[in-house]
Image (spheres, rainbow, N blue to C red):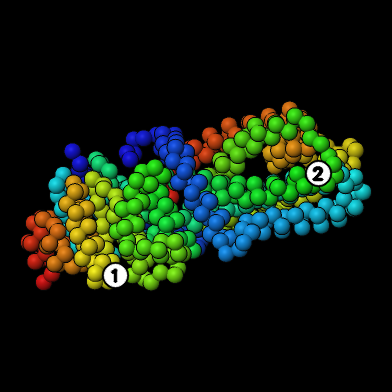
Amino acid sequence: MHKEHSYGAIARDDILRSIRNFQLAALLGWQDVVQRYRRSSIGAFWLTINMGVLIAALGFVFGTIFDSKMSEFLPFICIGLIFWGYFNQLINEGSTSFITNSETLLQLPIPFFTFVLRTWWRNTIILLHNLVIYPVVLIFFGALVDTDVLLVVPGFILLSINLLWMMLILAILCTRYRDLAQIIQNIMQVGMYVTPVMWMPSHLPTGTSPLMLNINPFFHLLSIIREPLQGRSPIPINWYVPALMAILGWTVALFLFGKYRQRINYWL
Amino acid sequence: MTSIELENVTVDFPIFNARGRSLKNRMISYATGGAINADAEGHVTIRGLEKVNIILKEGERVGLIGHNGSGKTTLLRVMSGVYTPSEGKINVKGKSASLINISLGIDPEATGRQNIALRGALLGFEKRALKLRRKEIEEFSELGSFLEMPVRTYSTGMQLRLAFSISTVIQPEILIMDEWLSTGDEGFKEKANERLRTLIGNTKILVIASHSKELLLENCQRIIWLEHGKVRMDGDAVEVANAYFT
């Protein structure tokens, strides 16, 4: 690779090659899941059981505290917890994507973004396992969803585009600054409480500034999934913010990745 | 035409101490105008290679010698595209592959067969291409019904056989090796060496780092002697080997 190549070209080349050979990332990601649960007969559904217990317990406690209708609150907290878990894992594991694959990176000329995709795929498989809880909750309460549920497809695509740039940027920065991963962990922990995961926006006292929700990017990212799954259409701002974030985020990510792509191996 | 051209290639490794690795310290140093730990920032570098000029042409079989830390592995990594030189240029024409750690990516919990798929994918085989070679790999490994067992149940020799069988199905134009591959028991050794020789015979450029004089003289016509990241001597294999191994 020549130095003359622009940052954008270097980044684009790496990412396109990774996507074209997605089967490698998919195989590695799948292998990660299989490896973790190889000796248990129900495999990754262990996680589903854990998640189910968590949802039932927190749903019951917070639903009672907030005096909410369970048929409304339980589906809400169910999706919130499942997807927050997904964000959290992606961001935390995403930031160590390069560090944990350093041996491979130092030996084989595999495009780097493959390892971000690997992390993404592994956690998406786990997400799919966890998602089986949701229909059970719906059936239990006899709740119905209508065609708005289909909006979850564009919602998930937009969500993934956003999560992938975050993972890429963090993977680069965390390889260089090893204490950043801990800071990220803290941020995600706090994020869970300030984002409506365990509380509903309707629980906020009237007169609360809407900024409390709207400046939180995770509120929007969660809404484009949760609203459709609950049979509602997300409000426009829930779409605009993630769309804007995707554009800005990827611009920064491509710049950083192009600039430091060739330095990452030296940082490992 | 396959070729590798290195022009004034220099490789500097940044050595970060705990402070240089820390974002917090970096922030503090900004906030305090950089007065604190101005030199403890971690910008120490170690020179791995210094102004290396090498041109390898098609058909060349080149050995690398030098003491530990002389830059052999770094040079191999530059040639295989893992490290981009900090200064200078490298131009590689042709598909290269390295046989450095052949066990990389082998998952001990997965079966032999799954590992063939896994390691194969890491080497750049697509699913379909690998399917065609699968039988060949399995037969070569002589593992028979053990291919259905997790690799952790294998003996060391068997693990090596599996890794060797998968890793040598590649046929690159440029082959990069760090020492000859060890392949376990006697019976397999002959067969494995035979295959390696065929593989090397079919590659257009071979670069092998080694400490063994016999091995280098047997396989290479040219030897490059590295010392402290610089080329100390570069020329006819016998000449350089005699100078180095005295």
Which residue, given by chain and number where applicable, does mark 2 sit on?
Answer: A139
Subunit ID for the residue under disc 1: B
Across and down, in percent, residue A3 comes to: 34, 39
State the mark number for residue B158.
none
Whether residue A42 is visible to the viewer of this picture, yes or no, is: yes
Please state, as top left, top right, bottom left or bottom right, where the C terminus of chain A lies in the image.
Answer: bottom left
Q: Is A41 situated above or below A69?
A: below
Residue depicted at x 70% and y 47% = A132
Residue depicted at x 19% and y 48% = B202
Which residue, given by chain and number where applicable, does mark 1 sit on?
Answer: B184
The quadrant in which residue A46 appears is: bottom right
Residue depicted at x 51% and y 54% = A31
Please state, as top left, top right, bottom left or bottom right, where the N terminus of chain A lies in the image.
Answer: top left
Across and down, in percent, residue A65 comes to: 90, 53
What's the amino acid at mark 2?
Answer: Ile
**Is B112 placed left or right of B54 in the picture?**
right
What's the amino acid at mark 1?
Answer: Gly
Which is closer to the viewer, label 1 or label 2?
A: 2
Q: CA distance from mark 1 to mark 2?
A: 59 Å
Across and down, in percent, residue A68 comes to: 90, 46
Residue depicted at x 61% and y 63% = A40
Badge 2 density bin: few <14, some 14–19, many ≥20, Cα 10 Å: few
Q: Is A106 situated above or below B243?
A: above
Hey, which residue is sitting farthest right in the picture? Answer: A67
Whether residue A199 is visible to the viewer of this picture, yes or no, is: no
Residue contact between numbered discs 1 and 2, judged by CB atoms under 8 Å: no
